[in-house]
Image: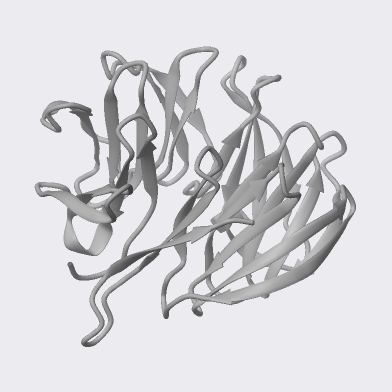
Amino acid sequence: MKGRIDHFGVDLKRQRLFVAALGNDTLEVVDVKSGRLQRSLGGFGEPQGVLYLPEFDRIYVANGSANRVDILDGTSLARVKSVERLNDADNVRYDAGARKVYVGYGNGALRALDPATGGSSGDIRLAGHPESFQLETRGTRIFVNVPPARHVAVVDRAKQSVVATWDVPGAESNYPMALDEPGRRLFVGARKPAVLLVYDIDSGKVVAKQPIGEDTDDIFFDPQRKRLYVICGQGRIDIVRQENPDRYSLEGTVRTAPRARTGLFVPEEGRLYVAAPAIGTSPARLIAYRLR
């Protein structure tokens, strides 16, 4: 498998990971119990975001260069529908309460899709291409990283509009994001300089900053262990401890592999998965970490 690897989805019941092999134009299906590759599905165009919904047994794959979202049957892995005209389709999230799939795409929009039919229920316009975004479960907001605008857009999904923007002070290239909703904190990873920004989601103010490794593309918050896992493309995971909602410290660093900057935290398994792309004679591989 060649090229860059992007984001993951997980099927807990069948113990499968779905890995967007962007540079290979494939979706890799991995059996996590055996650690083996089950299937390599072709026909995609730079797949970026992946979402699996067990209630529909459907896999949603956002294609960056093919400009569409493919919907696959979770059992047969066959395509059942494609939603076209979604230029540079990227991250995918699910609003379980409203039963809507959100896709970030284009020069600045979130598209809301019906998870069963793929039908559209409208766009929410943004100031630039959206990267990672997170949804409140106890409210109606979506927090969206918009790197071209150097801000976090706060969307009210009930109103389908941006209701606030929060600056990314002293930094840019804000790509990954994680949310601690009970603790009222939003975590944003910036690449220039490499720093973790912590926002109070009630005031919109930055309450803490923590230096991190270079080229981060995924951040996960572990509420049980009060940690953040920052996956960095320079070949490491930074483990950041949440001392309290306004105070953070580097607990440790785990070496991974060059350009390994994406992964998935699966709290139900107590595992963190990291994708290492093929480099030279070293093949692409999935690295699994058991958390303590």
* Residue 18 horizontal/vertical position (percent): 30, 45
Q: Residue furthest bottom?
A: 280
Q: Residue 137 occupies which quadrant of the picture?
A: top right
Residue at x-position 50% and y-position 61%: 289
Quarter in which the C terminus is drawn: bottom right
- Left or right: 146 with respect to 200? left
Left or right, 255 with respect to 84, comes to: right
Q: Is residue 204 left or right of residue 165?
A: right
Q: Is residue 277 above or below residue 107?
A: below
Q: Nearer the viewer, residue 6 or 84?
A: 6
Residue 48 can be seen, yes or no: yes
Q: How is the image coloured?
A: one colour
Q: Percent from the top left, x then y, of residue 45?
A: 18, 51
- Residue drawn at point x = 42 percent, y = 46 percent: 107
Q: Quadrant of residue 71?
A: top left
Number of marks in picture: 0
Note whether 138 is above or below 126 in the view shown.
above
> Which quarter of the image is occupied by the N terminus?
bottom left
Q: Residue 200 sits in which quadrant?
A: top right
Q: Is residue 212 visible?
A: no
Which of the two residues, 7 or 193, is positioned nearer the viewer here?
7
Using the image, determine if residue 52 lies above or below residue 38: above
Nearer to the camera, 263 or 116: 263
Q: Residue at x 68, y 56 (%)?
A: 228
The residue positioned 38% from the left and 39% from the top of the image is 10
Q: What x and y, as percent, mark residue 4?
A: 30, 67
